[in-house]
Image (cartoon, rainbow, N blue to C red):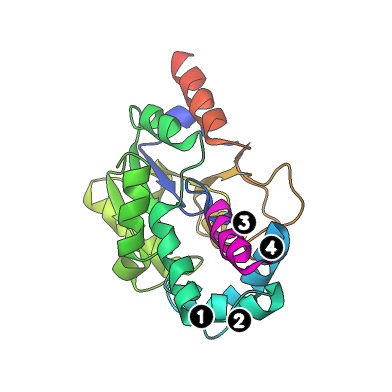
Amino acid sequence: MTKSLTTFKYLSFDVVGTLIDFEGGLTSCLKEIGTESGVEVDGEEALALYRAARYSDATDLFPDDLVRVYLLIAPKLGLPAEKAYGERLRDSAKSWKAFPDSVKALADLKQHYRLIAMTNARRWAFEFFSKELGNPFHAAFTADDTGTEKPDPAFFHQVFDFVSSEGASKDDILHVAQSQYHDIGISRQLGMTNCWIQRRHAQKGYGGTIEPAEFTKPDYHFTSMVELAEAVRIANEN
């Protein structure tokens, strides 16, 4: 039986794709470059190319890796394959927007839990994301802090060690994420309770996120952060 939402002390969050609209940020920047170059960029095509380029053996930490990725996908999109444009795509992360429901939902959830960010992004980028989200986090773990990326179990174990230092355990954490590949599957394998925020529920495919080898049925399933916040509110009133 799935544990009640009232039993958790912490909510751990994937950030990019769950709270920050990275697909919108990526495609917006690529379309701007396309407009300047007289090329119409299809957003879904760009995301598919990004996904294929991003998940290779030559990847660097995110979002620094966007420079390399851009140079790979630009010719296929008809865009100028110049490093300066790749750097522009990387730097666009500084202005990526939160999903419309993220800030309010996090503020509401913060009244009930300690919020932990778990992101494959580098610390420099996370600082911009956190500010965009209203700096709601009790603690944050980035690729720079952990030396690895999800779905590596080592990333999660560092979070387990942190909550242990505060007298809690992984059983006190509800892990919230949109990525089946990076978060939902591995959190299940590690014995965590998880919550899938299906951001692409109205779209086909996995967009900019790698497709999992197999689908993991989550403990909780919502299509938005506001639905999670509302479920928590109701649980606390009952």
Query: How far is mark 2 from mark 3, CA to CA?
Result: 25 Å
- Seen as rendered, the residue at the extreme right is 204
Image x and y of residue 48, in percent: 69, 66
Q: Residue 72 carries which label?
A: 2
Alpha carbons under labels 2 and 1: distance apart: 7 Å
Q: Nearer the viewer, residue 193 or 11?
A: 11
Q: Mark 3 points at which residue?
A: 180
Callout in the foreground (1, 3): 1
Q: Which amino acid does label 4 sit on?
A: Val
Residue under the point 31% across and 63% down: 123
Residue at the spot 65% in from the left edge and 63% down from the top edge: 47
Kindly report the distance in space between the C-alpha atoms of the residues bearing marks 3 and 4: 27 Å
The residue sitting at 29% across, 42% down in the picture is 135
Disc 2 marks which amino acid?
Answer: Leu
Span highlighted in magenta in the image: 24-39
Mark 1 residue type: Arg
Between label 1 and label 4, give the one nearer the viewer: 4
Q: Work out whether mark 1 precedes mark 3 in sequence or the reverse, and give the earlier one.
A: 1
Q: Regarding mark 3 in the picture, which secondary structure is present there?
A: helix
In this picture, is 175 found above or below 89?
Answer: above
